[in-house]
Image (tube, rainbow, N blue to C red):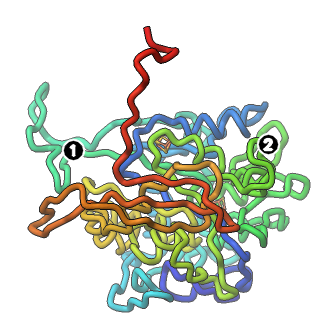
């Protein structure tokens, strides 16, 4: 089997196809700390793409409550358990083996889902039972159990730095992986990754509905349509990314789930990719900055080996071992950085959901100091900087300041009563 380099694992790994990468990659950063679980993203996707017959149960974007929620139910626990059974105790990292470019989180020591697959299989996976798809928001807003007397609550269960009673919302869609498990598993070669933007699509004419993609994808994002008898998945809103959104003709626009986000937790973009799969160094690209420079955003279950392209800023209040299992060994640095954000990071965080058009780079205009405090015994200062988001041609599309301006309505506003 060919070997490919997976930079999230810091090592080479076995994959069905040899190394080949798109010029740009569909990617996003989600700030879990900000999500309010309103499901506006979920409904934006549903009302755009999955309202037809056979798609009733399809939620290409879903927001589930961790630790208990999941769609399909327990998808991640099941994948982790399969990997543990195939490679007992294998899910460990050597964090001393760290290189900023080739292995920013250290080196993964265990097997990936590709390497743990049985002979004759491309990927270790499972097919969810029908009933596991029936409750997309099961356990919504349900926190972890914390032993207290019946009818009471624990007064310190929710104190920082880590809550003892906790939950968080996990926003999920297809990761448009660099090494897609769905693509590797398809016996019809019906799944392909577009060279221009890395979006992973299922050719509806080639697919024969064998469901191998559903079985293989550890994130369980391909879904079988029982009416058309073929599989479907998130298409990355590719017409919008291509600039075919009628609102902004000719301009690349964020997917619907990202553009609709009420909590302003999502920032989508297209990152440059080198022929060896590494990201093109682009210091002023907001996603490059967040993932590769500030290292505040991390991949979801990198140990699966698919090199997913949706990155998460982990929730600061959740016990670290749970987060390390979910986002890898970069968690501690990411949470510490987010707790006391450097000046540049605070500015870049303002770009989230500031524009529908895709931001390709940013620049910052410095402002004056507006606040000062002490975080973990160290002085921390806040500046009212202005961050300016630029399009592909370097033209300004949005500007936001750290301190939101206050607008006062004229006294006789039209809507006033
Ligand atoms: S998340 Fe799943 S469906 Fe999406 S590209 Fe990766 S393996 Fe394929
Ligand atoms: S729209 Fe944004 S804030 Fe609301 S659930 Fe989705 S990701 Fe969270």
Q: Position of residue 336 (x, y in %)?
A: 26, 67
Q: Residue at x 61, y 55 (%)?
A: 397
- Camera-side residue of 360 and 411: 411
Name the residue carrying label 1: 165
Q: Position of residue 331 (x, y in %)?
A: 33, 69
Q: Is residue 296 left or right of residue 301?
A: left
Q: Is residue 61 left or right of residue 411?
A: right
Does residue 17 appear in this view? Answer: yes
- Report crowding for label 2: few under 14, some 14 to 19, many 20 or more residues within 10 A (C-alpha): few
Q: Nearer the viewer, mark 2 or mark 1?
A: 2
Q: In this picture, is 64 found above or below 126?
A: above
Q: Earlier in the sequence, mark 2 or mark 1?
A: 1
Local secondary structure at mark 2: loop
How far apart in space, not on screen, are marks 2 and 1 (Cα)? 46 Å
Does residue 67 appear in this view? Answer: no
Q: Residue at x 56, y 53 (%)?
A: 398
Can you tell which mark lies on residue 90? Answer: none
Q: In this picture, is 261 found above or below 88?
A: above
Quarter of the image where the C terminus is located: top left
Figure quadrant of residue 40: top right
Q: Residue at x 64, y 72 (%)?
A: 178
Q: Residue at x 66, y 84 (%)?
A: 274
- CB at mark 2 closer than 8 A to ligand 2? no
Q: Position of residue 205 (x, y in %)?
A: 91, 54
- Report crowding for label 1: few under 14, some 14 to 19, many 20 or more residues within 10 A (C-alpha): many
Q: In this picture, is 368 found above or below 274?
A: above
Number of marks in the image?
2
Name the residue carrying label 2: 246
Quarter of the image where the N terminus is located: bottom right
């Amino acid at each position: 089997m060919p070997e490919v380099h997976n930079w999230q694992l810091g090592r080479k790994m076995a994959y069905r196809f040899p190394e080949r990468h798109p010029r740009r990659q569909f990617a996003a950063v989600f700030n879990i700390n900000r999500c309010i679980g309103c499901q506006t993203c979920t409904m934006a996707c549903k009302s755009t793409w999955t309202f037809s017959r056979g798609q009733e149960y399809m939620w290409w974007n879903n927001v589930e409550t961790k630790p208990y929620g999941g769609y399909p139910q327990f998808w991640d626990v099941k994948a982790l358990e399969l990997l543990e059974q195939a490679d007992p105790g294998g899910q460990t990292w050597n964090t001393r083996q760290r290189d900023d470019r080739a292995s920013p989180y250290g080196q993964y020591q265990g097997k990936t889902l590709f390497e743990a697959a049985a002979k004759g299989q491309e990927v270790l996976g499972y097919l969810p039972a029908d009933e596991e798809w029936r409750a997309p928001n099961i356990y919504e807003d349900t926190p972890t159990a914390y032993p207290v007397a019946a009818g009471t609550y624990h007064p310190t269960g929710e104190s920082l730095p880590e809550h003892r009673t906790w939950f968080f919302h996990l926003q999920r869609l297809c990761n448009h992986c660099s090494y897609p498990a769905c693509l590797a598993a398809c016996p019809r070669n019906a799944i392909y990754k577009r060279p221009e933007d890395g979006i992973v699509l299922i050719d509806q004419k080639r697919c024969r509905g064998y469901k191998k993609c559903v079985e293989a994808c550890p994130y369980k994002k391909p879904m079988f349509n029982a009416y058309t008898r073929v599989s479907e998945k998130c298409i990355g809103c590719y017409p919008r990314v291509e600039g075919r959104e009628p609102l902004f003709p000719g301009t690349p626009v964020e997917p619907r789930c990202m553009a609709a986000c009420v909590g302003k937790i999502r920032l989508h973009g297209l990152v440059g990719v080198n022929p060896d799969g590494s990201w093109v160094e682009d210091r002023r690209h907001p996603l490059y900055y967040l993932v590769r420079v500030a290292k505040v955003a991390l991949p979801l279950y990198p140990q699966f080996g698919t090199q997913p392209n949706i990155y998460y800023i982990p929730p600061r209040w959740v016990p670290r071992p749970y987060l390390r299992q979910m986002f890898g060994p970069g968690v501690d640095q990411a949470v510490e950085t987010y707790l006391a954000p450097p000046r540049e990071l605070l500015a870049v965080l303002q770009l989230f959901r500031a524009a529908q058009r895709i931001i390709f780079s940013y620049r910052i205009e410095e402002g004056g100091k507006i606040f000062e405090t002490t975080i973990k015994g160290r002085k921390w200062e806040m500046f009212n900087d202005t961050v300016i988001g630029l399009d592909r041609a370097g033209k300004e599309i949005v500007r936001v300041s750290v301190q939101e301006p206050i607008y006062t309505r004229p006294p006789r506003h039209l809507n006033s009563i």
